[in-house]
Every structure is written in C-alpha cells, then in structure tokens.
Amino acid sequence: MKEKNKRRWWMWVVVALVFVVYAATMLVVRLNNPIHLQKTVYQQWKQDYLVTRGQATFVNAGTTKHPAGLSEAQGYGMMITAVAGQRGWASQKEFDRLLNYYLSERDVVDNKQTALMKWRQYQKDGQWVSDANSATDGDLYIADSLALAAKTWPKRAAYYHRLEKALANDILAYEYNPATKVLMTGDWVDAKSRYYKLMRTSDVMPTVFDQLAKDTGNQQWASVKNQMLDRLVDLSNQHKTGLVPDFAWVTAKSAKPVGANTIASKYDGDYWFNACRVPYLLATSKDPRAKKVLNKMMKFFAKQYEVFSGYTLKGKPILKRKNAGFSAPIFYAVNHNRNQGYDNLFNSEKSIYAQRLNQNDYYGATLTTLVAVEGWK
C-alpha cells in the first residue's frame, strides 16, 4: 500500500514538473514574440470589450450583464483602433463605427450642441440613457484619436481633422479655466462650482497638447501645456517619491493635493486610479519638465520590491497587489526611456503580458491593450 502511494505521489510530482516546464516555455515564447503577442492582446480586447449598438460600436466599461459606455473608454478604444490600423490589424470601418458612437453621444450645453462627449451611457429599465456633462480626459483622448486616424487613413484625413478641431475648440470653450489657465475636469464645472480650481493630474497630456496646437494652429494649447506641466512639477516637488495625486487644487502659480473624498474617493489625494496614467502620458514628451517628473517617479518605482495598486504620496502601498492599470503605464514609460536608472521595471512590469487579458477589468485590460498596440522592443 505504501509503495502504491509513493508511486502516486511521484506521478503527481512529474505531472506538476511537466506543467511548470510547459508554462515556463509558453511564457518565454509569448514574451519573446512581441508582434504576435501584441496582436493577440488586441484581438482579445476586441472580443471582450467592444459592443455593437446599431451602426456604432462602444467600449464596454461595465459588465456583460450591465454594459456601459464612458467617454474615457471610447477615447481609448478609438486610439487603440487607430494605432492598430497603422499595423494592419484594424480597418477604417472599425474606427468609424467607434466614431459613430461618439458622434451620437455629444453633449449639449446651454441648449447648444457641442463636440464634447457625454461622459456615461448605460441601460435603465431596458432603455439606454446618457448622463449629461463631459469628462475632459475622454474628450482629449477622442481628439487625439482623430489626429491618429488622419495619419492612419489619409484619404479621410480632412474629415477627421475637421472633427478634431471642433472638439479641440470646445474643450477650450467649455473645459478651460481662464483664472488658473488649466483644464477643468469637465463642462459641468463653472466659476460658481466648488471644483472650479480642481485639476486632474491625468489630464496633463503634453504630447496631445502639442498635437492639438499643431493641427488647430491655436497656440493656446501651448499655454495649457506650459501651465499644466508647471503645476505637475509643483506636485512632484512636494514629496521625495515624486508621486502625484489623482486630483489637486491649483492656482495660476501653485498646486496642492486635495484631501480624501473631495470628488471621487477617499484616495483622491493619493497616487490612485487616475494618477496611475501619468507615466504613460509623460513617456514620449520631450519637454524637460515632463522628463523631470517622470524620471523622479519611475526611480521611486524601481526601488520597490513590487509595484502595487496605489500609493500614498509618501510611498506607502495602498493595496498590496498588482493591477494592470498601474503596471501598463509604467511598462510603457520605461520602454520609451531606457538607460535612465529604472530599466529593471521593463521585465517586472512586462509580466502583465504573461497571461490572458482580464475579462472583468475594463480599465486594466484597455490600458494593457493600448500599450501593446503601440509596441515595444
């Protein structure tokens, strides 16, 4: 009996070893064939998160049972599809279906149709409804996607640029604070709002601002870039970690983190699910201020045993578990800024591509896909 149990034990040991070897082999193959991996990630994301509604397609930021659209999600989806089109993985028709959804959900302000997108759509009592008001990050992503689409499908470039310019103009008309000279969080904020001087750090998009300045010929975008980068530098300088909060109170000359539960959650003043995008947004900027903020932040992460989901500005982990929404932007940033003192993050954060996309995490899966289609070496 003992001999039989011993043989059975060895059998399971062998099975386990075979599985480990197989898994390790597949991991090596997966991570060392980047083009195949990147395309596979994109195809998985399309299958899991794109939903058809009539002649349009939206990115599902909800669940299978309770789907929902977000302007942020739509912007990401349009960016992903435009870049995938450059790689021959997506068609102009696929992009235009995503574009159709945006066009059908534009916001109305003071009885005037704008180019801004309503921030959320969902089903209620069996009917689709839209929450009015815009979200600035979503509008910026959509504008950037239109600039990308013009490069991807040049025969339709004039149309895409026309839409881009209309959206860029309305961002400045309805989402800009002339007192602080930075972008507000949406068109729902005005001079009477308590959030009039609130800035979301993930709205600081220097390369997008550069593109909009170039495409529209409006140098106010250069001013927006300068002012918002200056405020981001102010925030970065306040802690040795270089971490910045999700939201900050700003004036024309200063910035400070907000307190807990100011607008979205008890982590509003921490490096949380908005600020986690900052490494991605600064990664390709050539502006010295963007590089300064990024390098300081990334060197903090490089010293950590593992990059977790959220941090206080002093560097204390909030959730001691990994999340692709935090890892993907860091991976993208180190890929575009090698030999800066944080190359170790390339392999540690690349681990998010060792498994299938999470089918129940729109945010992490979408950021992972955005980084994948843009490629790496």
Image (tube, helix red, strand yellow):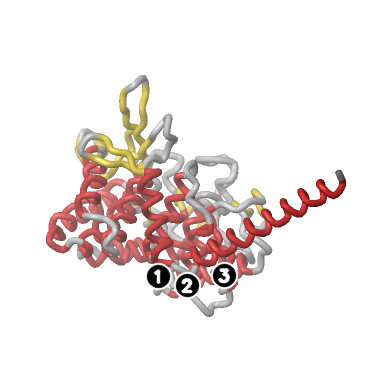
Instruction: Quickly name the residue at label 2.
Output: 291
Q: CA distance from mark 2 to mark 1?
A: 7 Å
**x 40%, y 50%: residue:** 44
- Residue drawn at (16%, 63%), measured in percent from left and top? 154
Q: Position of residue 238 (x, y in %)?
A: 60, 63
Q: Position of residue 287 (x, y in %)?
A: 41, 73
Q: Check residue 285 in the rendering and tell me which mark sits there, or answer none.
A: 1
Question: Given contact means CB atoms under 8 Å apart, are the residues at marks 2 and 1 in contact?
Answer: yes
Quadrant containing the C terminus in the rendered view: bottom left
Q: CA distance from mark 3 to mark 2?
A: 8 Å
Residue 138 sits above or below residue 374 on the image? above
Q: Residues within 10 Å of mark 1 (few under 14, many from 20)?
A: some
Upstream in the sequence, badge 3 or badge 2?
A: 2
Determine the secondary structure under disc 3. helix
**Left or right: where 305 falls relative to 342:** right
Dot 3 amino acid type: Lys
Residue 318, labelled with which disc?
Answer: none
* Sequence-wise first label, 2 or 1: 1
Few, some or many C-alpha atoms within 10 Å of disc 2 (few <14, some 14-19, many ≥20)? some
Task: Say which amino acid is labelled 2.
Answer: Lys
| Residue nearer the viewer, 178 or 90 | 90
Position of 196 compared to 10: left or right? Answer: left
Give the residue at mark 3. 296
User: Which three-letter amino acid code belongs to the residue tagged 1?
Assistant: Ser
**Dot placed on the residue nearer the N-terminal end, 3 or 1:** 1
